[in-house]
Image: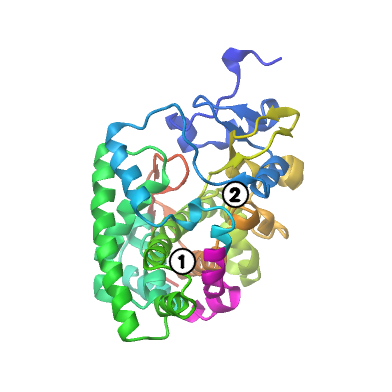
Amino acid sequence: MTDLVDAPVWNPFDPEFLLDPYPVYARLREEDPVHRTPIGTLIVSRYNDVHRVLRDTESSVQRFETNVDLPEHMLRLRQRSLERAPSILGLDPPDHTRLRGLVQRTFTPRAVGRMREQTTAIVDDLLDDLAGRDEIDLISDYAFVIPFAVIHSMLGLPDTDMAMVRGWSHALTQTLEPYLSPEQVDAAMDGGEHMDAYLRDAVAQKRRNQADDLLTQLVEVEEAGDRMTEDELLSMVSLLFVAGHETTVNLIGNGTHALLDHPDQLALVRNDPAVDDSVVDELLRWDSPVQTSGRRLLHDAVISGVEVADGEMVLTALGSANRDQRFWGDTAGTLDVTRADAARHVSFGSGVHHCLGAALARMEGEIAVTRLVRRFPGLALSGEPTFNARIILRGRESLPVSLGTPA
C-alpha cells in the first residue's frame, strides 16, 4: 500500500504541477486512478474512465452547490451568470440539444473548409509583418492574434473593432476558471458589460443589413424559427470569442513549444506536408489546452473498482488520458506527429458535449503551426517560457523565440 505521505496528489495550486502535470498524472494512473482531491471532488485519470464519464448519458455539466461559500468578491460573477441566458457549456439536454442544433451546421468541416483560404491569408499576412524581427513572443505576437482574427472575420465584424473586442474577450476568458482574484473579477465584469453592449449593436446591424457571415446566419436562425432568444444569441456569440479564442491560442503555443523541444518532430513538420493531417491532433494529445472537464453523475457507479455516489462531481483529467499507456501503448509518452490514431485524444471532450468548434480549431492550428515552422526554418527558443497559472486551461503565458532568416 502506498505510504500516504508519499501518495500522489492532484493539486493545481502547486507551481510545479502547473509547469508539468504529467509526472503526477502518471502516478495517479498507476496508484490512485479515481483520486479524491484536496477540494473533495473525484478526478479520474485513465483513458477508459475519462471516456466513460464524458459519454455518460446520466450525468450533468451543471455545477452543483457545495457547502464551500464563494469568496465575496466572486458573488458578482455568480449574480451576472444568473441574470444572463446560460452558456451552452453549462446546459444539459434537452436545452443543450436544442441550442447546439441551431448552431452546429455553421461549424461543420465543410463550413470550416470555406474559411481555410481566409485563415491562410490572415496567417501569411501576420508572418509577413513578423519577418523583419529577430525575436518575438510567440504568444502575444502570433498565437494570440490568429484565432481572434479568424472568429472576428467569420462573424463579419469590423476590423477596426478587433483590438477593443479582444481585450474584453481576454478578460472574460478568466471566468472559465473556478477561482479568480478581485482584480480579475473587476476586469471580467467590465469586459462583460462592454461585450454585451457591443454585440447587441452588432446583432441589430445584421438584422438591418444581412451579409454572408456567421453572425447573420445565427441571427437568421433566431428569427426564422423563433427558437433562439436575443439573450441566447448573445451568450452564444460571446462564447465563440471566449472559449474559442483562448483554447486555440494554447493549442498554437503548446504545440509549437512541443515541436521546439523535439527537433526530430519539428524537422518532420517542416519538411513533410504529409504530416499535416495528423500533426495537430498529436499536438493536442501531447499537451492538451483543456486539462479537465467535470461531470456530476446522476446515479451510483463503480469506476475502476471505486464506488461513486449519485450526485458526486467527477473531474476528468483529459491531459492524463491522452498519455495513458493502457490505451496508447508503449509510445504514449512519445511525441509522434505521424501517429495514425492521434485523433482519438479527448482534448475536445467526448459525447454530446464534444467541442462544437473542433474542426475550426484543427484548421487554425494546422495552418498556424505548419506555416510558421516552414516560413522560419531557424525558429528556436530564445528564453525561458512562462506558464499561465490556471486550473482548467493550460498554456504558455510567454514563449520567447528567435525567428532566424525567413525561407
Q: Position of residue 123 (x, y in %)?
A: 42, 72
Q: How is the image coloured?
A: rainbow
Q: Secondary structure at mark 1?
A: helix
The part of the chain drawn in magenta is: 98-117
Mark 2 Cα-neighbour bin, 10 Å: few <14, some 14–19, many ≥20: many
Image location (x, y in percent) of residue 179: 38, 37
Magenta span contains residue 111: yes
| Position of the N terminus by quadrant | top right
Q: Based on the displayed image, in which of its 4 quarters is residue 48 positioned?
A: top right
Residue 296: image x %, image y %?
58, 40
| Secondary structure state at the residue bearing disc 2 | helix
Residue 333 appears in view: no
The foreground one among 117 and 58 is 58
Q: Residue at x 39, y 75 (%)?
A: 155
Label disc, if present, on residue 372 of the rendered structure: 1
- Amino acid type at circle 1 is Leu
301 horizontally vs 126: left or right: right
Magenta part mainly helix, strand or loop?
helix
Q: Is residue 341 above or below residue 364?
A: above
Q: Which residue is mark 2?
A: 286
